[in-house]
Amino acid sequence: MENHLLSIVTFLPIFGAVIIALVPKEKLNWIRWGAAAVTGLQLILAMWILKVFNFTSGDVQLVEHYAWIPDFNIEFFMGIDGLSAPMILLTALLSFLAIFTSWNIDKAQKGYFALFLLLDAGMMGVFASLDFFLFYIFWEVMLLPMYFLIGIWGGPQREYAAIKFFLYTLFGSVLLLLGMLALYFISEPHTFNMIILAEQSAQFGQAMLLGMNAGKVIFILLFVGFAIKVPIFPFHTWLPLAHVEAPTAISVILAGVLLKMGTYGFLRISFPILKEAAIWFALPLAILGLINIIYGAMAALAQRDLKKMVAYSSVSHMGFVLLGMAALTPAGMNGAVFQMFNHGTISAMLFMLVGVVYDRAHHRDIDGFGGIAKVVPIYAGVTAMAFFAGLGLPGFSGFISEALCFIGAFPVFTWITIFATLGIVLNAAYFLWAYQRIFMGELNSKYENMEEINNRELYALIPLAIITFFLGVYPTPMLDLMSTTLNQLVEAVRSAGMVAGL
Amino acid sequence: MNLNQIVADLSYFLPELILTGILIMVILFDLFQKADTSIRSGYLALGGLALVTVALFGQDVSTPTGIFSNMLAVDSFSRFLKVLVSIGAILVMWMSFNSNELKGRRVGEYYVLILVLVLGMYFLVSATHLLSIYISLEMVSIMSYLLSGYLKEQMRSNEASIKYVVFGAFSSGILLYGFSLLYGLTGSADIFEIQAALAAGSVSPALMLLILVMVLVGFGYKVAAVPFHFWTPDVYEGAPAPITAFLSVAPKAAGFAIIIRFFNVAFSNSGNPNMEAWSALENMNWQAMIGVLSILSMTVGNVIALQQSNIKRMLAYSSIAHAGYMLLGVVVADQTGIAAILYYASIYMLMNLGAFFVAIHIKNAFDTEEIEDYKSLGYKAPVLGLIMAIFMFSLTGLPPTGGFVAKFYIFRALIEYGDMYFWLALIGLINGVISLYYYMRVVKAMYFGKMEIPETVHNAPINVTILLVLLAIPLVFGWMIGDPLSVYTMDAVQFFVK
């Protein structure tokens, strides 16, 4: 059982999707509760995984390793370490909570929940895979349900948003595929096994591809593939549209989990396998991180649509992750992965809150409200908390991870870090300004009878709020979980750079 | 050549003989049928072809053999393709039983013509002599002309047939001219002897280039590669839909077979396609030329497909693009490249026949071929919609479908070959992204937009549903169970060498 935990946690939602597909569509509550039960069970399993996970070891654990397509040395290889364990937990948690955010989906619910579960399986698979081919399959499998979920249940511009998302990410994927094949053929014996590829790291630094250093070429190919997912400026233009048009729960998943896959890809594949290229690319990556931080925040400041503002805040927050990992210091790396987790929980809260107000007012224009704190005090309170968490106020988890990123990056990229701190000010500016326009001041008479946040919505938010707060005060458990693996990664990349004389 | 040898060779020729016997039987049987019962001839033809397919499986091809003075080769390469086109023909006959276009006609000869076409392809995939190549190519072509004009009182069908004839005659004329040059300059019509003569340097480089271009025109037309593709859209639109489906997969696969065999023998420096590594003849860089054709086919096919609103035309242009992907495998033309083409051709057959069959059923049930009119199909006919979506995803090449694996093997072969084809792989992959847009238009029409949920759902007749499910299941699950097809295709890369 313990040895199959990862495949169970990955394939359970597919099983659930099949069951839901068989339920008659009139039985709405069966469908919803069925989905909730499946994701709930998945969350329990994810916690069990953490329980059996050995925190003191940086190696991959809970390994499942079988031959799959032997002719091409493709393996079914799953396992987790301190990098993927937090992501598994995050995926399970957000999937479970997002089911409740999906409660008032008003059409074709059966299809919605079945596709949602497929998406869930794809995400889990990405984080659990250690074979590049398997990773790629899951990476792509996610696209299909996402395309439908945005395209069928989204807002007015959903069809355009869905195809744009699909085209962008598929374009990234094909570059990923090229990079993957190049790695396969340079490695000896040919393999997709990420652990073995990482061991052969030095080989990629020496081989040639297209008359250039193979490691660098492949790094760039993978970089574009992952950058589109993060998204890194200038590959970000699909994001605001997809976020705005997607239904609330899907925005939660997009921001909470999908964006993490890009940075996860860097840390799982690009950094350990192409160590020398990673050092070579560290400075550009840090600069791109800075651009993301500042540009995302400026763009957020300019938005009138609340959901778009939150979407751009994601761009900004993911910039911290990039800056932290580019530094290649233990503090920066831990900060980056911690920020990935925290952004997952915080942006999920933000999108859920946007969904709450949209369900009542049917618009998201920041200037179209005013003074509603008087009518919906609980909602105002929760939103205040989420906004504070978003802008990185001490006491919330976002503060710790951003601070770690800065601490890690400062000795390496001093000036970039100094400029990046400007992002914190800008973050505070748009969050507080938006809060002020929506909740403070004269009450807009249209919303005198606005309905307060209901229990279902609140219960989906509370766990996230507790986690954000808890990790803000006491981050040690999460840092313990990841630090062994990440410190090893930093050490490995640094020493490879040392050997290569970088 | 003595009579005993011919008689001895006949034992290798058994599937073809059985097929010929069945063909004659169907013709005789059809004499006793009236128009409304002539469908029985179709059943007989289908049953007979199934029998032949079984016989093919039983054929021993462990030692590749040339028969009838090396006119034809019996090897596992030709066997694989014979099985492939037979299965394609069986599926198409099955769908033809359900086609409204053919209802109320005498259809006996329709099935006979399909059988002859299949027989022609059997010859084409095993031909190793200029004469047998040309004759089998004509046999395939003429049957295709007849079948595409089968709806004789329809303008579109007539137009299809006449366009096909004109283009076909023109390109086979050029091919024949190239062949006569080859024969005249090398003194032999046997492709192995031609190779020996060319390798010995008896032909001047300029003439070799001329021959190469002429041969490429002839074969390129058969697989509908750009710029020899102009007949495709009109023929595909005008021909009876099941025939369109068939033409887009089976003769195309057979065309690739002859390209592979001919180029890898006659125009290679070793003349032995079974070797791990070999290269094109000096002065005859056909790999680069086919690379250019491939880029053109993918790009032109995809870009024009973007603008189509009729599903048959869209699939027609996309089939040009798919020919381009398969040509990428020809560029590599080593063992993995050839296996990848065979794999691609098999998967393409499943998914493209599937897409056409759904289109045929929609035409039967809703009388439309416009992609726009597929709106809300996912709700009106959930099973059909889901299956069509699977075919569309597979044609795009998205995991977890066989279409992805097929593309993956092609690109794998390209990148394995080395740096120089890296760009080719990149262009091919980007073309896959372009194709996403038009394939997804079908999915978009079926599922997105204003949802019209009807009172009762539409279900295809049970035999159509079974047929479609049979096509879709191997696409989704075939590769997950360790990919048996890739094993078959690897085994099939075994050629007869004189």
Image (cartoon, grey):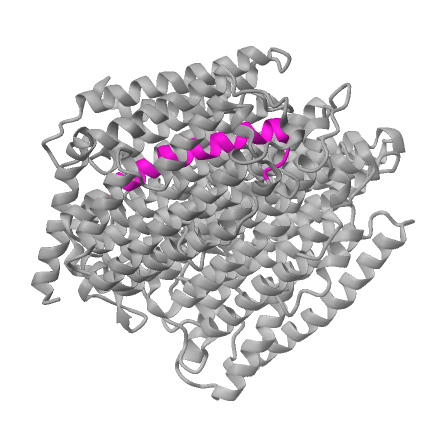
Q: Is residue B490 visible?
A: no
Q: Nearer the viewer, residue B60 or B225?
A: B225
Which residue corresponds to the image point at 48% horizontal and 87% vertical from the top-left? Answer: B205
User: What is the quadrant of the C terminus of chain A in the image?
Assistant: bottom left
Expressed as whole percent of the image width and height from the top left, the position of residue A101 reads 50, 24
Q: Nearer the viewer, residue B329 or A112?
A: A112
Is residue A253 rendered magenta in the image? no
Which residue corresponds to the image point at 41% horizontal and 71% vertical from the top-left? Answer: B268
State which region is magenta: A337-364
Is residue A354 rendered magenta in the image? yes
The count of marks equals 0
User: What is the quadrant of the N terminus of chain A in the image?
Assistant: top left
Residue A10 position (above or below residue B430): above
Q: Nearer the viewer, residue B160 or A465?
A: A465
Expressed as whole percent of the image width and height from the top left, the position of residue B227 reads 64, 70
The quarter of the picture where residue B389 lies is top right
Furthest toward the right, the residue is: B153
